[in-house]
Image: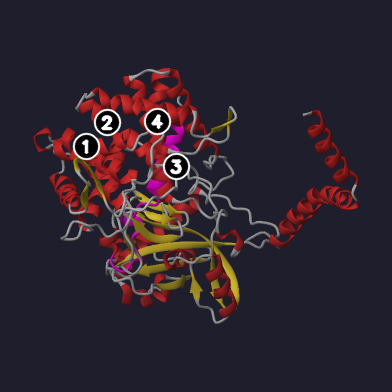
Amino acid sequence: MGQVLDNVMSRWRAIGESRTYRHLARAAFLVPLLVLLGLLAMHWLRGPQPEFRPPREAQTKAAGDLLAMTAAFLSGEARAAPATATPTGRWYVTVYGASGAAPTTVRAQGSIESWAAPLRKRWPGHLQVDLAFDNPPGARSWPSGFGLDVGLDGWIEADGKVHLPVEFVLRGYDRRKLSQFISDHPGTPLRTYAWVAGPEGPLRMLRHSVDPGPITPALLKRRCDLGGDYLTRHLRPDGHYDYDWLARSATAGPGYNLLRHAGTTYSLFQLYSATGKLAHYQTAVAALHYLRARRQFATGDRSRCFEVEGVNVKLGGAGLTLLALVEQARARPAAADWEWMHCLAEHIVHETHESGDMASYYAEPNRFRPNARRSIYYPGEALLALVRLFEIDPDPRWQQTASRAASYLVHRRWVALGIRITVPPDAWLLQALEELHRQLPEPAYADYAFAIAEVMTRSQLMAERVPEDIRGGMLSRGLPGVVAAGARNEAMAAAAQLERRLRPGETFFLERLKAGARYSLRNQYTEPISFGLRRPATSLGGFRSSPLTPRIRIDG
């Protein structure tokens, strides 16, 4: 053994004394310097960012007056207008027609009679007013400032044609498309404050969103109901949803995902339990029929079943379908499909090893090929399903399997050589651990659930300097994704429940939940922000993928 160690050490000394190693060592000291120089260069190229301050109260009042005055004039009710003179400043008035056609924008200056006539061709429609303001000298914000910079520029072409900021949102422009637009249309950036009419006065828009107001149970219930109505409208006769809805063109996109179908159906049964709206229940039942048509049984064992998507049998599919069935049984016990629930649960138990590790994909000779990929999220989905099933069907095997799987996920899944490598932001596992902790109050379950929640909050945009329309969203490569925000809101709700139970008086996770909910609701298509879409009613209630992406996915 001593000889072996001597040989190893001599080799390391030889490497350390080699010329190549010395050159690499010197170069290593240059890496931090090069990184620093690169960051400074990026900052210099980007230039100073424009300062953005909220509009003054007087400007908001002027916007309300201009909205009312224009609507009255276009409706032939000029006498009802509060004034005929346009407020001072560089104001623009836009009318969006109901069919999604290009809007008409005019510069509002002087008496209303001198500028409002071109708007009549789009009236009746949706009114928006913009007040332009100047950027600080030397500020360059477009298109680099289009993301986290709340100001959001429009564009004035050399011939005077105006493109207001919201137009680029409705087009779904990313940075590449914006850069191409600049190249094709020489001009100058235009920065504005924007308002639309609301039931109680003008609503200030930020990046084509409006503040939903205080986050209350009543507001959440109303918005969830609106989302359920969207799903009901987008269920096809065969029981599948419009998985991807392109809101601007009012067309369904390609592709489908059976797991998200099951998860969406699960949420509809939950919604029915909260609202009692029959249409939501009927939609969920029809969607279950679509899943049943894709159910298969294990060869030689009809006590185990699963959903097949293509050539794959995913553990998450069994988990999410079981969750949907459990929620149906809770909502309407007489409609419970015990045979289906039990055969899904038996499959999950079968796929859980003695160690507690769960196989993400089911394999069967000559039928389903082995897949060694290990999903981060499938085990959490399956675990939550077993925990929920045990609550309505207290078979000890469901809880024993759930406990074994939870212990593995908490203590072993992401641990090597006694060191925890990572804590993935697994929303499903957090919910499962919170509910399992109610049944079996193991401190480790609560500790790991809190650890997951804390990981999630680290990527949540909460600082005061973050633009308010994306505050509460999760940090990502571009603007925060709304689908991811929805999933993490569910996790934050579970963390807030655990916090209330184990940390009385603390509201950290509750406040994070409210911030996440506010971000999600800003991106739900409601009447104030559905204008400019081809068929606004088809998108009402759906959640767009991001503030700049007019695309709705069913799991948003």
What is the CA distance from the residue labelled 1 to the residue labelled 3? 24 Å
Mark 1 or 3, which is nearer the eye? 3
What is the CA distance from the residue labelled 2 to the residue labelled 3? 20 Å
Whether pointer 1 and pointer 3 mark residues with C-beta atoms closer than 8 Å, the reply is: no
What is the CA distance from the residue labelled 4 to the residue labelled 2? 18 Å
Element type where label 1 sits in the image: helix
The 10 Å Cα crowd at callout 3, few under 14, some 14 to 19, many 20 or more, is some
Q: Is residue 63 visible?
A: yes
Can you say whether 155 is above or below 429 in the image? below
Give the residue displayed 20% in from the left and 39% down from the top.
343
Would you say residue 145 sits in the magenta stretch?
no
Specify the segment rendered in magenta.
511-535
Check residue 356 in the rendering and tell me which mark sits there, or answer none.
4
The 10 Å Cα crowd at callout 1, few under 14, some 14 to 19, many 20 or more, is many
What is the CA distance from the residue labelled 4 to the residue labelled 3? 15 Å
Mark 4 or 3, which is nearer the eye? 4
Question: Looking at the image, is mark 4 or mark 3 earlier in the sequence?
Answer: 4
Q: Which residue is mark 1?
A: 327
In this picture the colour scheme is secondary structure
At label 3, which amino acid type do we have?
A: Ile
At label 4, which amino acid type do we have?
A: Gly
What is the CA distance from the residue labelled 1 to the residue labelled 2? 9 Å
Query: Main SS type for the magenta part?
Result: helix
Can you say whether 212 is above or below 181 in the image? above
Q: Which residue is mark 3?
A: 376
x, y percentage for residue 233?
21, 57
Question: Looking at the image, is mark 4 or mark 2 earlier in the sequence?
Answer: 4
Q: Tell me if 27 is positioned left or right of 133 in this view.
A: right
Q: Which residue is mark 2?
A: 388
